[in-house]
Amino acid sequence: MKSFDIFERQIDIKSLINEAKRILDQNWMNGFTRPARKMYPHQWSWDSAFMAIGYATYRQERAEEELQRLFSGQWSNGMVPHIIFNDNDKESDYFPGSDFWQTEHLSQSPNTVSTSGICQPPIHATAIRHLLETAHDRRQAQSFAKDVFPSLKAWHSFLYRERDPNDEGLVYIRHPWSSGQDNSPNWDHILQQINLSQEQIPSYERTDNKHNDSSERPSNRSYDRYIYLVDFFRKRGYNEDKIRRDGCPFLVQDVLFNTLLCRAGRDLAQIAEWLGKDPSPFYKQAKKTAKSINKNMWDKNHNIYVDLDWRNGEKIDVYMLSGFLPLFANVPSPARSEQMFSYLNTQSFCQLKKNCLAVPSYDRQQPKYSDQKYWRGPIWINLNWLLYKGLAQYGHREYDKLIKQTIIYLVQKSGFHEFYNPKTGEGYGAEKFSWTAALFLDILNSERTVTF
C-alpha cells in the first residue's frame, strides 16, 4: 500500500463537515436518527448515543431529543432495548421487525412504542456526560440530565441485577446482536455448538442481503442461530430468570459491553455529583467491574482482554480490537497498557510507520480475518473513536494522530460508510451511515469542557 498523509493532501475539511451534517439531517426522523435510510430504518440504542455525541458539537437540542426518544422505549424493569421501532414506516422491509419480536403484550414493555427484546452496550451515560461538558446552553443541559437521570439509574440497575447473578461485577449478554459486533469471530465456537433441527428454526426471510453484498454479511447458518435465540427468548416471555434457568446456549461476558458499562458507571457518578445526588453507588459498581475485567478477562499471553463464556467460565481466545478498549474506561494499569500497546502496534493490527490504515477490528494474522466481512476485520469508526479516546488517557499521541488521519482519509476517499477495507480504504455496508458522520464531527471538534 502506498504511503499516505492527510496533511499532504488537499482535503476540504469544511466540505466534509458539511456533508456529515447533511447526512445526519437526511437520516433524522422527527425524534431520532436512522443509522441508514434503507438498511437500518429504526432507532438503535448505542447508535443513538454516538449520534448524540456528534450532535453535541453543533446541535444540542437534537442530541437531547435523540436520547429522550430512546428512553421512551425503556422497559419497566430498566432495560433499554436495542431497537425502538419506527412503526410509521410502512415501506420498511427490515427483519426482524416488531411483529417477530412479539414484545408488545409484555407487562414490562412500553405501550407507546414497539421494541426489540435485547439490549446493546450501555454507553448512554457517557454520551450525556459528554453533552453536559460541551453544552452551549448549560442550564438546559442540566435540566435534561436531571430528567433522564432516573432512566440511566434504572438501566444500570437492570444490568447488575439481571445480568450478573453471581455478583461478579461483570454482566453477560445473551445474543450476538447485544454486543454491537454482530458477526464477530468471538461467537463462532458457541454458535457452532448450537445444533438445530429444521423444526427448531422459525420461518423467516432475510432482508439484509437485499441491501448489501451477501459476501459482507453473516452466513445463513449464523442467522439461523440468531433467529433461534430470539425465539428462545420470546417463548419465555423475555424473563431473565427463565432464560438463564432453561439453559440459554448463548451467555457471554463481553469485554466491550462491560468496558462501556464501567466507563458509563463512572460517568453516571459524575452526573450524579453535578446534580447534587449521591455518586457513591455508581463509583462502587464501576470499581468492581474494572477489577473483574482485570482479574478475569486479561490474556497475559497475548496482552489483550478477551470475552468469557459465562456458562463455563472459559476464556474465548479471539483477539479483537475491542480487547484493547478497556483503555477507554481506564481499566488497565499504566504498565499493562504498555503491554497492550506492544500488541496493538504490530502488523497484527496497525504498526506506526508501516503505512497502514488504523485500525482493523480483528487481528490480521488470524485465519478468520477478512478485509470486508462484517465485523471480521474491517475498520469501524465507532471502535476507532473509542480507542482514540482511550489511548489519549495513556499518552499515545502519535498513534492517536494516526487514527484521526485514518478517519479523515477514509471519509474523504470513500464517503461516510458503515465500515471500511483496512487495505484499500474502500467503503462497505450502508452508505451515509449516521454514527460515522457523528463521530467524524466529534473527533474534529476541539474539546471544550465546563465545570458544574
Image (cartoon, grey):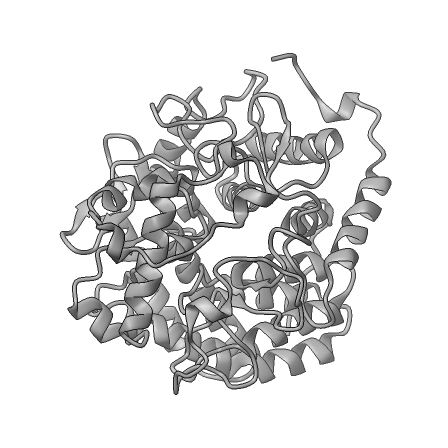
Q: Pick the residue in front: 231 or 168.
A: 231
Residue sitting at x 57%, y 28%: 421
Q: What is the quadrant of residue 246 in the picture?
A: bottom left
Point out residue 5 in the picture as x, y percentages from the top left corner.
Answer: 70, 22
From this view, report whether residue 382 is shown above or below residue 365: below
From this view, report whether residue 202 is shown above or below residue 387: below
Left or right: residue 109 versus residue 44 is: left
Quadrant into which the N terminus falls? top right
Quadrant into which the C terminus falls? bottom right
Point out residue 71 in the picture as x, y percentages from the top left corner.
Answer: 55, 76
From this view, report whether residue 70 is shown above or below residue 295: below
Left or right: residue 361 versus residue 54 is: left
Residue sitting at x 61%, y 73%: 87
Residue sitting at x 75%, y 32%: 412
From this view, report whether residue 48 is shown above or below residue 18: below
Residue sitting at x 68%, y 43%: 431
Q: Pick the residue in front: 48 or 82.
A: 82
- Observer able to see residue 214: yes
Point out residue 62 in the picture as x, y percentages from the top left corner.
Answer: 73, 69
Q: Pick the residue in front: 449 or 162.
A: 162
